[in-house]
Image (cartoon, rainbow, N blue to C red):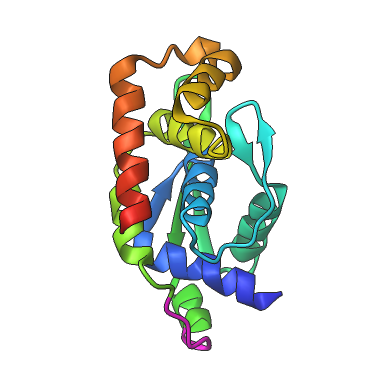
Amino acid sequence: MLINHAKLMQFFSVAREVVGRKKLQKMIYILQSCGLPFEEKYQFHVYGPYSEELSLRTEELCNLGFLSEEKEEKSNYFQYHYTITTDGERFLEQFDMKIASLEEKSAMILDKSARFLELVATMLYFKQLPREEVEKKVHIVKPKQNYNETELKEAWQLIDALMDA
């Protein structure tokens, strides 16, 4: 059980801060899809791939004091900021864990918007299909997002870079 918590803590140690629950969900899904050893189960949901396990594990880490969750009030919603705490760093020291290419792949997606990561995660969710079919599927399941050709091209470039890293 704690190994999966430690893997997630390793991610937060590398990322330093993640702004937004949706962004966290998409980042872990993308990293998992690129072969990193995150084991959360995902289902397709309103905002693309979603893991109840990841939500619960994050909540547990906050309750243990290993992660800090700061709630910021925006105009019509709340945004959550996650950072690793000193206790979280100490917890992580108990595990001899270094996830290969985690830093490199995380750096490639950390500065991307949640909206863009939603696109990338959705495309990866349908990765068994040919690229043209993936793009059609994106427009079917995400019609309100109105992703354009430039965004789709950038998403494919990022996916290719992540897979090659």
Q: Residue at x 47, y 82 (%)?
A: 97
Q: At which x and y percent is residue 11?
A: 45, 64
Is residue 8 rendered to the left or right of residue 157?
A: right
How many discs appear? 0
Q: Work out whether residue 154 can be spotted.
A: yes
Q: At which x and y percent is residue 20?
A: 47, 40
Is residue 122 rendered to the left or right of residue 158?
A: right
Instruction: Say if 144 sits above or below 153 in the image.
Output: above
Which of the two residues, 44 or 130, is positioned nearer the viewer here?
130
Q: Residue at x 35, y 14 (%)?
A: 148
Quarter of the image containing the N terminus? bottom right
Chief secondary structure of the magenta span? loop
Which of the two residues, 23 or 67, is positioned nearer the viewer here?
23
Q: Residue at x 53, y 11 (%)?
A: 143
**17 in magenta:** no
Q: At which x and y percent is residue 66?
A: 54, 69
Instruction: Say if 134 sits above or below 98 in the image.
Output: above
- Please report the bounds of the magenta region as a residue range: 93-98
